[in-house]
Image: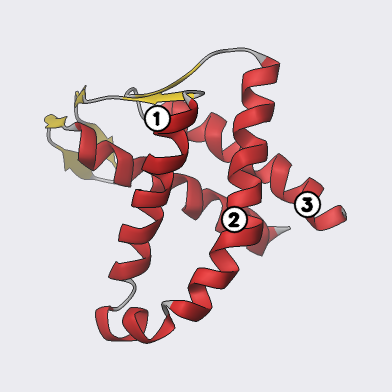
Amino acid sequence: MKKIFRMIIFSAMAIFLTSLWNKGFLIENDFIVYFKASLIIALVYYLIVPITKIILLPLNILTLGLVSIIFYGVLFYLVFNNIGLITIKAWHFDGGRFLNFILMPMDINYLTNIFLSSFSISTIINLLEKIL
């Protein structure tokens, strides 16, 4: 029970942090919507991800993890395209600076934004699990 509750909190934090930097990742500022979305992500990461890690292990070894990134992007698309709690759309990144690196402005299309969002959420959840 404690692990599921932590996963729901981590998912909510990941959704919030992703919506801060990704302007194409839109979610309503409503507690119920955040709770439903974080509950769905927590269930996916608690139930489906461990099974897929075992099943996709040989392919992940051969492709250095590319198969799992593609699988999580497709899973993210299927879950949130059908439910409608989170809207993902194309957006224009204005560019900026990060640790003496200049990030150029670019247009990010819909498909790329799905993979960026799923990568961001899974990375944040994994980092929070490692830290706490």
Q: Quadrant of residue 35?
A: top right
Kind of residue at badge 2: Tyr
* 2 vs 1, front mark: 2
Q: Quadrant of the C terminus?
A: bottom right
Residue furthest out toward the right: 1
Q: CA distance from mark 2 to mark 3?
A: 10 Å
Question: Vertically, is 29 above or below 120?
Answer: above
Provide the secondary structure element on which disc 1 rests.
Answer: helix
Farthest residue toward the top? 29
User: Would residue 119 be visible to someone looking at this image?
Assistant: no
Which sits earlier in the primary sequence, circle 1 or circle 3?
Answer: 3
Please tell me whether residue 45 is drawn above or below residue 64 in the rendered image.
Answer: above
Residue located farthest toward the front when viewing the structure as drawn: 82
Which residue is label 2 attached to?
45
What is the number of the mark on residue 4? Answer: 3
Instruction: First in sequence, mark 2 or 3: give its number.
Output: 3
The image quadrant where one finds the N terminus is bottom right
Q: Is residue 122 visible?
A: yes
How far apart are the two marked residues, 2 and 1, measured between alpha carbons? 22 Å
Task: Give the amino acid at mark 3.
Answer: Ile
Which residue is under mark 1?
21
Give the distance between the C-alpha atoms of the residues marked 1 and 3, in whole angstroms.
Answer: 26 Å
Return the residue nearer the eye: 102 or 55: 55
Q: Residue at x 32, y 24 (%)?
A: 24
Quarter of the image for residue 48 reads bottom right
> Would residue 31 appear left or right of 26 to someone viewing this image?
right
Q: For the point 52% across and 80% down, which residue is it?
A: 54
Image point (42%, 50%), residue name: 75
Where is residue 11? Give x, y as percent: 62, 42
